[in-house]
Image (spheres, rainbow, N blue to C red):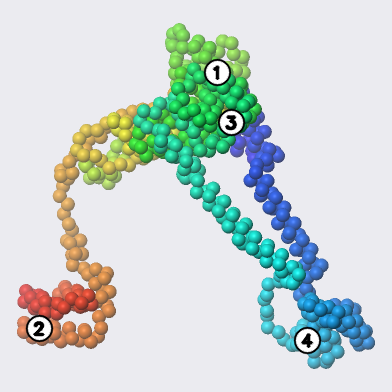
Amino acid sequence: FTSEEDIDAISRTSAGKKKSADLKKTSRGLNTLNSPSFIISLCLAVLFSVIFVWLCLSIQSNGEVNSFDPFTILEIDSGAALKEIKKAYKKMNLRYNLDRNPNNPAAEAMLMMVAKAYEALTDPVAKENWEKYGNPDGKQSLAVSIGLPEFLLNIDNRNLVLLTYLIVMVIVIPFAVWSYYSNSSKYGEKDVMYDSYAWFHHNLNDHTLIKNLPEVLAGSAEFRERNMTKSQADKQEIGNILAKVKSHMQKPQFNHPVVLKGNVLLHAHLTRQTDVLSEASQEDLKSMLRYSSSLIDAMISVCKNQESLKSALNCIKFGQYVTQGMWVKDSELLQLPNFSETEAGHVAKGKPSVKTIMQYIAVPNESKKGLRDFTDEQKEDVFKCCDILPNISVESKVFVDDDEDDNVYEGDLCTVSVKLTRNNLEDGEKAGLVHAPQYPFPRLEAWWVALGTREGKIISIDKVTSPNKVVDHKIKFLAPKKGQYEFTLHVLSNAYIGFDHTESVELTTQDASALPEYKVHPDDAELDDEPTLFEEMMNANIEDDSDSDEESDSDDESEEEGIRELSAAESKKQELQKARKKAAAAAGDDSDSDDDSDVEELHADE
């Protein structure tokens, strides 16, 4: 049973009470069990539990004894007299006689056990072995075997067992593997279907406007089965809703029923007209909003792949509208509880005129306008919400790690450090869940950090999810050619409207030729004379006879030049040449005369 914090059921304002109540209904109690995956898992668990209990009972009633007990086998009391033992033996022998039990492996095995039990009680040697080792045959080695149920070994059941084995191995298991693979192969990153990625690639470009994005989202593959209109009543309902939201919609580019229905339902949410939807349509809309966060992130990743900064920023802003249940022409003040266009218009009138949410938050509570008709509880909700909404400051700087000077040269690895500070939080406090009463699911506060060129190309775009008061994010890229550049840094909320931050980042790069000349250290230069790993291996594998030949040749040559002791460096070079000569000989290159001349030239130079 989850807590209220886990399901975002804590209503910080009265505007969030309805959302909290809905979350409690759907995320607690027996409602959490009403899912196909849970029902299937429950059925399998019950089935295997029944099988396990049945096997335990079968073993308890019909299982073989673990130790050899002749009294139990003959069904007599321990300490029975010899006369009773013989009588019991005859009785058991008649019961399991093979003439009475033809083709019965169990009777044959039991008859052998009866004979062995009788022997253990009547034969002195066998009795001594049983009393000493627990077996009439004497001390036995440990034997481990697998016990199979009796019905599997019964000849009458062999056809059924074989048929069941074929069904499980040939049909059930391959079908399960195929189902798992076919289902998992449909999904890519962020658990988004590949068909949705293809749809986004087809419809997103530099000219995509925010008003076009509800239709793009509605065409996602995740919605195609559920949003298919199945009856004339469904079509009639979608037509009625379309008439109410058509003035807020961009002209549809697709007339497919699935895309049209999803587009209409999303606009009903964005314009806060969900009260006209039927219960079934509300469930369909709720299903779309459940996947909207990951799908919008996938749309942003597609824009990143296309290097289209404008369309990526539009997708981020579209995610803000979906979270707050607002649309492009709505006032930012509608994010406040109990606010409508009437209150927002009243706030914008007169002096001082307040049109943005950040300006309204900065106004002292006693001077806030638009609250004349509010109750004390409603006013308190507005003040609480103003404290919850983010208030950030952004600092950025460009530098090159481990650089000798402050200049940036062409090809350097540049780092843009972005420091995001949440001024509305106390030290050690972490950002909580987003205040979004119109969005039916919990959502964590996060920020998108994007760096782009003046031409609208994306250099970097990342989602920063850390809830800390101060967050440091670093963007790395290679410095461009010599010149002066001006980049644009965007910091956008994933859920709130009107809190985005934009600033310029300037960068001056110098020509790489202006860098001081790099001088090779003498120790590094000597590394060029070191043998490679292959040459060392070849040198280690030189045969003794070839070594003796090489040594004799070396002695003859040294006599011509005068015998003298070689230095360590000369010895290493000589060994290197020997290894190279051996490698050439192994490759079939007949270069003995050339190698000899090389050695002569080497000693001549020395």
Of marks 1 and 4, the one in the foreground: 1
Residue 244, numbered circle: 1
Give how far apart the Cα atoms at labels 4 and 2 are: 88 Å
* Residue type, mark 2 in image: Ser
* Residue type, mark 1 in image: Lys
Give whichever of discs 1 and 4 has the lower sequence position.
Answer: 4
Which quadrant does the C terminus fall into?
A: bottom left
State yes or no: discs 1 and 4 in contact (Cβ < 8 Å).
no
Secondary structure of residue under mark 4: loop
Of marks 4 and 2, the one in the foreground: 4
Above or below, comparing residue 203 to residue 527 in the picture: above
Check disc 4 and report the residue beneath it: 136
Give whichever of discs 1 and 2 has the lower sequence position.
Answer: 1
Give whichever of discs 3 and 4 has the lower sequence position.
Answer: 4
The quadrant in which residue 603 appears is bottom left
Which quadrant does the N terminus fall into?
A: top right
Name the one closer to the observer, 69 or 520: 69
Of marks 3 and 2, the one in the foreground: 3
Secondary structure of residue under mark 1: helix
Query: Around disc 1, counting alpha carbons within 10 Å, would you say few (fewer than 14), some (14 to 19), or many (20 or more)?
Result: some
Query: Around disc 3, counting alpha carbons within 10 Å, would you say few (fewer than 14), some (14 to 19), or many (20 or more)?
Result: some
Q: Would you say 559 lies left or right of 475 here?
A: left
Query: Around disc 2, counting alpha carbons within 10 Å, would you say few (fewer than 14), some (14 to 19), or many (20 or more)?
Result: some
Residue 229, numbered circle: 3
Of marks 3 and 1, the one in the foreground: 3
Give how far apart the Cα atoms at labels 1 and 4 are: 94 Å
**Residue 94 point in image, percent of width and height:** 89, 82
**Residue 599 point in image, percent of width and height:** 11, 77
Check disc 2 and report the residue beneath it: 558
Give how far apart the Cα atoms at labels 3 and 1 are: 19 Å
Secondary structure of residue under mark 2: helix
